[in-house]
Structure formats: C-alpha cells, structure tokens
Amino acid sequence: MSDDLLWAYGVVAAGAPLPDDIEPVADGELVVLTARVPRDEYAVEPLREHLNDLAWLERVARRHEAVLEQALAQATVVPLRLCTIFDDADGVRRMLEREREPLTRALARLDGRQEWGVKLLVDGDRLAATAAPAGDQAQGEGGAAYLARRRNERQAREGARALAMQIVDDVDGSLRAHAVDAVRLPAQNRELSGHTGDMVLNAAYLVDADGAGALHEAAAELQGRHADAGARIELTGPWPPYNFVTGETTTQPA
C-alpha cells in the first residue's frame, strides 16, 4: 500500500489547462485535479483529529481554494468539497464512473459562468432611526409617558425589521435579474467571520462571465440607494461554484 493518498480539488474537462503541481487522473472526458498527501496525516483517523485543529484546517482550506482559483482562471471547474480524499487513482476513476452524468451536466451548466457572493449588512441603530415613527417622542415622566416610550420603541423595532426585509428583497431581487441562478445562504456567525453590523442577507449568484460587470454596477447602485438606512453591500468573487453544483462526492479513503 502506498504511503500517499490523493487529495481531490475539482473536476475539469479533458484537455483543460492544469494548475501547477497537480497530478491529473483522467477517465474519458473528465479529469480530476489531485495532489499526493501523506497517509499518516490524511487517513481517516488522523484526519478526524486534524479537523478539530482550526489552524490546520485554515491552512489546508487556503491551499484547496488557491488551487481551485488557479484552475478557474483557465477553465470551467466543478469544485469538490474540502477533504475529498481517495486511496489511489483507481478510487478516483471509480468515482468518475459513478458520478459521470451529474459531473458532465455540471461542467456544461457552469461553462462560461461565475459564482459571486453578496452579503448585506445593516447598522441596527441607523436602521431603527430611519424606521422610527414620526411625531412626539413622549417626553416627560409618569406612567403614560413611559408607556408611550415603550410603544415607540416597539414600533421602531418592528419598523426596522420591516425595513430590513424590504431592503433584502430589493437587493436580492435586483441582483437576481442579472443572474442565471441564485441561492440564499444562512447568515454567517459574527464572531467567526468578524463582520460588523447585522447580516440580513448572505447569498450567491451564478452569472454569465460577461455579465459580471452588470452585477457590479447593480450592487453599486443598490449601495447608494440604501446607504442612508445604514446598509452595506459586500460583493466578492468569483468563487468556486460550490453553491451551484450537485452530485459531487466526499469520498474518504477506505
């Protein structure tokens, strides 16, 4: 048994340019981009331990994404998820045989297209101020004034939530008009991502490559439209199109 396993990055069509330091495994018209990794670090048991090591996980994730980004600059790629590992080239070919149809469809669907990510963040205080009801602010003391202030605060919170959803629908609807497909994703944890503000939209958009400029222009126009309400739009990419691929494998070594 070899001391190495094969880490798989993604699938390209036969004849596509290859990233540096890649060992291609081909079967018919499909090629898997792989690299050798040591068995004593990437076999099932040591891998399970490493996945609890955030520094190790960040390092291998950055390497995985770097290879995919290099591949995407030259060809259409169906990305494989992190830690897709095979015992040998025969295992890779068996996966290709099993997944040939969905992988072939995915390559055709993704050809000439890019995935872009959009995060919509809002400043809760500015949003509440924008949505606050007009009129008296219930000054003074006493029970009536207290109840009035509480009513205004509740109305402000409800108005802020409604305004946030209006902005979400406007941003998402406008960007979808420039996309072939789109998905809404769970909001990211603030502590893990380090973002400021409240993330009210986390979405991915699949666009034709020659339409990416229009997506950027739309995002900039939306930013200007909603800036006074404390909204901020972050457009990033192009990314490996994980959110628009189905049927990819996550096979581990046996």
Image (cartoon, rainbow, N blue to C red):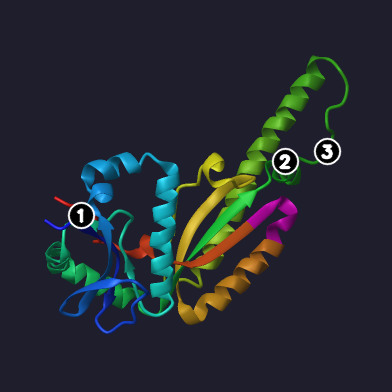
Q: Please name the amino acid that badge 2 sits on.
A: Asp
Q: Is residue 230 magenta?
A: yes
**Neighbour tally class for label 1: few under 14, some 14-19, many 20 plus, Cα within 10 Å:** some
Q: Nearer the viewer, mark 3 or mark 2?
A: 2
Q: Is residue 198 visible?
A: yes
Can you tell which mark lies on residue 36?
A: none
Residue 222 location (% of width, % of height): 65, 64
Q: Is residue 217 left or right of residue 45?
A: right
Magenta highlight range:
225-232
Which numbered disc, 1 or 2, marks the residue closer to the eye?
1
- Give neighbour class at mark 3: few <14, some 14-19, many 20+ (Cα, 10 Å): few
The CA span between labels 3 and 2 is: 19 Å
| Residue at image location 62% in from the left, 73% down from the top | 217
Q: Give the farthest residue toward the bottom.
A: 15
Q: Quadrant of residue 135?
A: top right
Residue 249: tell me if it is visible.
no
